[in-house]
Amino acid sequence: MKLKTAILGVTGYVGQQLLSLLVRHPNVDLRLLTSEKFSGKRADEAFPHLSGYADLSLVSVSKISYSQPLDIVFSCLPGGTSSVFVRKFLEEGVRVIDLSPDLRFSDPDDYSRAHGAAPRFPELLSRAVYGLSELNREKIKDASLVANAGCYSTCVSLGMAPFLRTHDTEDDVIVDIKSSYSTSGRAPKPESHYTEVKEDVSARGAGGDDQKHEILRVLSDFFGVEKNLLFFNTRVPVKRGIMATSYLKLRSKVSPDEIKELYTRFYEEDVFVRVCDGPPGMASVSGSNYISLGFCEREGHLVVVSVLDNLMKGAAGQAVQNMNIVFGFPEDEGLGQVPLFP
């Protein structure tokens, strides 16, 4: 079965990564691609790296027809805008995977705390299934609307989940993020100019505070754990990747072998989670849908280091993984990319 598929918003990094994955997915038939900047052009004209893969004409999202036959829509539109179009497609009975932050909280109050404003369509929040594949697989299977998990939340939550599920720690958790410049999107900003970021490490404009609340929601909803989270994000001059270093203060001694066995058992059926012997680096997952986890003990703390490619497992790759779950395809279908080296 080939799914009649649309992608809303292919201009940005996430939309481009998603398009690059779906043009080679054996169960996808792309029918609609939207782009405001390149409306009227063919996809392979606007994006030369897709030459020979995508010759569909790009259209403005304001000109699409909601009555055309589609099986699934991916929305890569900006937060605040995405839910407008998600709502319309849902009304037509189309399944939707939303990659924006619009629908990741089931409670409107949680949304307001994270974003500083009320949700545009609060009735959609309770309908959306949180799309963190490894933790919510059973609910994703039957979902008509999947709210793709955020990149920071995926990286941190999958790193801490096995330990917090079984071990007691102090209430204060510190998460130190090192993120690439593609996490801030493709739109040019002063803090992303080449001459300002080359050979520099900076916390300026790092963002991600909404995903601090998302992480807390994951810990509460999936594991019944309430923590105080100190979350700090620093940008490093690389194209892709996130490294999250999480510090959990132990209440009792745990051996490294016990920790590794715990993580290995927890993720033994998850093809995209790699449990490492030592802390992994960003480059070890670049270009792939893998997340790698490593850990060590320091001064009474469990230090968990988790790394992923923010455009893949942190966004587009996880969206494809969620689509595979929804439609009963092998979970790794279309996601067999080996990490890039060098």
Image (spheres, rainbow, N blue to C red):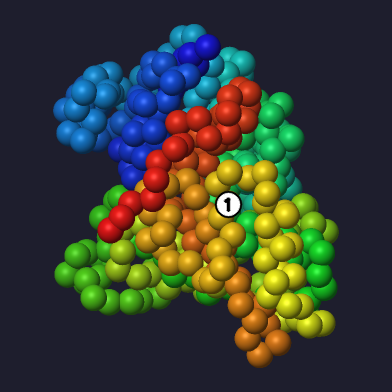
**The C terminus lies in quadrant:** bottom left
Q: Residues within 10 Å of mark 1 (few under 14, many from 20)?
A: many
Whether residue 26 is situated above or below residue 331 in the rendered picture: above
Going 76% across and 65% down the picture, which residue do you hit? Answer: 164
Query: In this image, 151 relative to 15: left or right?
Result: right
Please identify the quarter of the rendering in which residue 252 is found.
bottom right
Whether residue 29 is situated above or below residue 137 in the rendered picture: above
Residue 165 x, y percent position in the rendering: 79, 61
Name the foreground residue: 263 vs 137. 263
Please identify the quarter of the rendering in which residue 78 is found.
top left
Going 58% across and 33% down the picture, which residue do you hit? Answer: 331
Name the foreground residue: 328 vs 187. 328
Name the foreground residue: 151 vs 124. 151
Residue 252 visible at all: yes
Going 63% across and 86% down the picture, which residue do you hit? Answer: 298
Residue that mark 1 sits on = 273
Whether residue 179 is situated above or below residue 199 in the rendered picture: above
Q: Amino acid at mark 1?
A: Val
Residue 341 x, y percent position in the rendering: 31, 55
Residue 20 x, y percent position in the rendering: 34, 34
Residue 207 visible at all: no
